[in-house]
Amino acid sequence: MARTTDSGLAPHELRVLVAVADTGGFSAAAGTLGLTQSAVSHSIRGSERKIGAVLFERGRAGARPTPAGEKAVAYARRILRLLDILTAEARGAVRSDVPEGPLRIVAFRSAALHLLSPVLQRLRARHPGVEPQVRIVREVGRGSAGEVSDGKADIAIATLGGSVPLPPGLVANGLFEEPYALVHAAGHGAPRSLPLVDWAENCSSYTRDWWAAQEWIPKATVEAEDDGAVLSLVSGGHGMAIMPALSLVGAPDSVGVVDLGPERPTRQVGYVTTSQLAGTAVVRAFVRELRATPPPGVSFPRNR
């Protein structure tokens, strides 16, 4: 597709791109935006001419972003968010950098349960003008960092240093190292002999070398959807699991926790945002509270 000399997209064209991607079709996007279907179609064709690439695959089922379209939509979301935040940042500058406005946060489940709640309490108390909007996502594949890269979130509490590289344009900072422990039904005399209970979000990429060197770890015979289900199965005597510390905060007495020793695996928990949003008042306020809130402690006794 030939590219025109005017390759810049206007904000209304960016909004159309995002609406089509979010709704899955031109008609649905038109309804969301209050436009006609022909106006949406015309806008998409114009954007494709400017960029020089097909952005959506059209079909009976609707419209699906092409690889070029996925990238364009991600940048469109991020640009529109910067436009939205411009007013709040300008007002904040007049008011001595007082943060206000929405802040879109994503976190994986255990971080949301045991780390995010006190952070939000402190943030709301100190900055009532900030409006946190929280989503919980699974930390698999591109995970929470991918949500930021796609423009769906301003900041993520994420696991860092895995096998999936950080997308370009993002910045990450670590908060703490989270150790893993062996978990089993309390009172079991030989927990390493039990079958393995595992789940997709268990971040094996962070522990792969250690995991491969442990001949006593069997192949998983039970796979659960989340760490809460794993704890329930382990508590019921259906197997043992190797779990990170945040997942074990508040574990019931029916669960035994065994320290894996000085060579135990760990994963790094931190936050991810974009280079553009890192300096905004709302993100900086959230990061200050995040750093000021110690992670919940978990004791790993040798046996329980």
Image: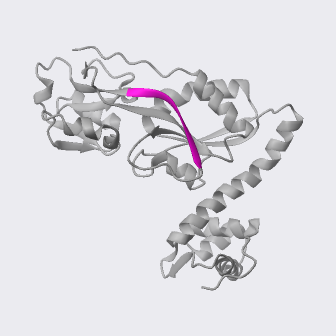
Q: Position of residue 93 (x, y in %)?
A: 85, 37
Magenta-highlighted residues:
170-178
Q: Is residue 37 above or below residue 218?
A: below
* Residue 56 belongs to magenta span: no
Q: Is residue 257 above or below residue 201?
A: above
Q: Is residue 236 above or below residue 226?
A: above
Look at the image and tell me in which quarter the C terminus lies: top left
Q: Position of residue 77 (x, y in %)?
A: 64, 58
Is residue 210 shown left or right of residue 141?
left
Residue at 66% from the left image edge and 41% from the top image edge: 278
Residue at 68% from the left image edge and 34% from the top image edge: 284
Q: Position of residue 81 (x, y in %)?
A: 70, 53
Residue closest to the eye, 152 or 288 = 288
Q: Please identify the quarter of the rendering in which residue 96 is found.
A: top right
Look at the image and tell me in which quarter the N terminus lies: bottom right
Colouring style: one colour
Q: Look at the image and tell me whether residue 155 can be seen.
A: no
* Residue 174 belongs to magenta span: yes
